[in-house]
Image (cartoon, helix red, strand yellow):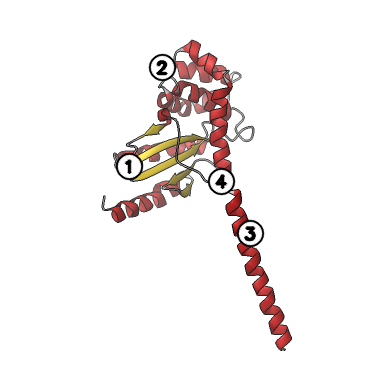
Amino acid sequence: MTSSLERRLWGAAIIVIAAAVSVLSVRRIVKPTNEAAPAYRQKGPADAPIVIAEFSDFECPACRAAEPGLKNMLSIYDGKVHFLFKHFPLTPRPHPFARQAAITAECAGRQGKFWEAHDLFYANQADWSESKDPKGDLIKLAIQAGAAEAPLRACVEDPSAAASVDADKSEGNNRWIGSTPTFFINQRRFAGSQTFVNAGTIWIDKILRTQGK
C-alpha cells in the first residue's frame, strides 16, 4: 500500500516538474517586447500612464468594427493614453490583400498621412478587398488621404516598407497573437473589441486609481 502511495506521489511530482519545465521553455521562446512604433503610428503623450498597442489587419472586418469603440476610449481617456498601431496582416489566409494594405498605409505614414489612410482603408474595406486591382485601389485611397503619388508608388515597391510591416508581424508572432484585433494595455492582452472595451476599461481605471490619476 505504501509502495502504491509512493508511486502516486512520484507521478504527481513528475507532472509538476514537467509543467514547470514547459513554462520555462515557453518563457525562453517568447522574446522580450517593447511598445515602439514609428512616430506616425502613435497618438497621445509619450509619458502617458496608459500605453495601448493594437495589432490590427486592414482587411479584417472585426478590426474595422472595433474602430468606433477604440476611438471612444481614446476620447474618454484623452491625455492619459499613448496609443500605438502595429501591423498584423493575416496574409495569405484569410486576408490575401492585408499585407499590401499595411505596406501602402506605411508608405502614406512616411508622408505624414498614416491616420488618414488608416481611416479610408477601413471605411472602404468592402470595396478594395473585393477589387480586381486591390493594390491600385489602395494606392488611390492613399492619394485621396493626401499622400503624393510619385513617392507613394516608389515607397510601395521599396523593400524597407514591407520590412516594417513584417517586423510588426514577427513581434506579434512572438507575443502569440492568433487573431485580430488584439490589444495590449500596459502589456496585458485583450483579444477582440468587446474584451478590449469592457475588460480593458476596468483595467485602465484600476491603473489610474492605483497611480492616483
Compute the Cα span from label 2 to label 1.
29 Å
Compared across the picture, whether 99 is left or right of 151 comes to: right
Compared across the picture, whether 95 is left or right of 205 comes to: right
Disc on the earlier residue, 1 or 4: 4
Compared across the picture, whether 207 is left or right of 5 comes to: left
Residue 16 appears in which quarter of the rendering? bottom right
> What is the crowding at mark 3: few (fewer than 14 residues within 10 Å), some, or many (at least 20)?
few
Disc 1 and disc 3 in contact, CB within 8 angstroms:
no
Disc on the earlier residue, 2 or 1: 1
The x and y percentages for residue 208 are: 31, 51
The disc placed on residue 48 is 1
Residue at the image point whose x is 57% and y is 26% from the top: 162
The residue most toward the top is 150
The x and y percentages for residue 77 are: 30, 43
Check the image and report above or below for 68 versus 13.
Answer: above
Compared across the picture, whether 24 is left or right of 141 comes to: right
Compute the Cα span from label 3 to label 2.
50 Å
Compute the Cα span from label 1 to label 3.
36 Å
- Name the amino acid, label 3: Ser
- Between marks 1 and 4 in the image, the one whose residue lies nearer the viewer: 4
- Name the amino acid, label 2: Gly
> What is the crowding at mark 1: few (fewer than 14 residues within 10 Å), some, or many (at least 20)?
few
**Element at label 4:** loop
Q: Which residue is mark 3?
A: 22
The x and y percentages for residue 96 are: 62, 29
Disc on the earlier residue, 2 or 4: 4
- Name the amino acid, label 4: Lys
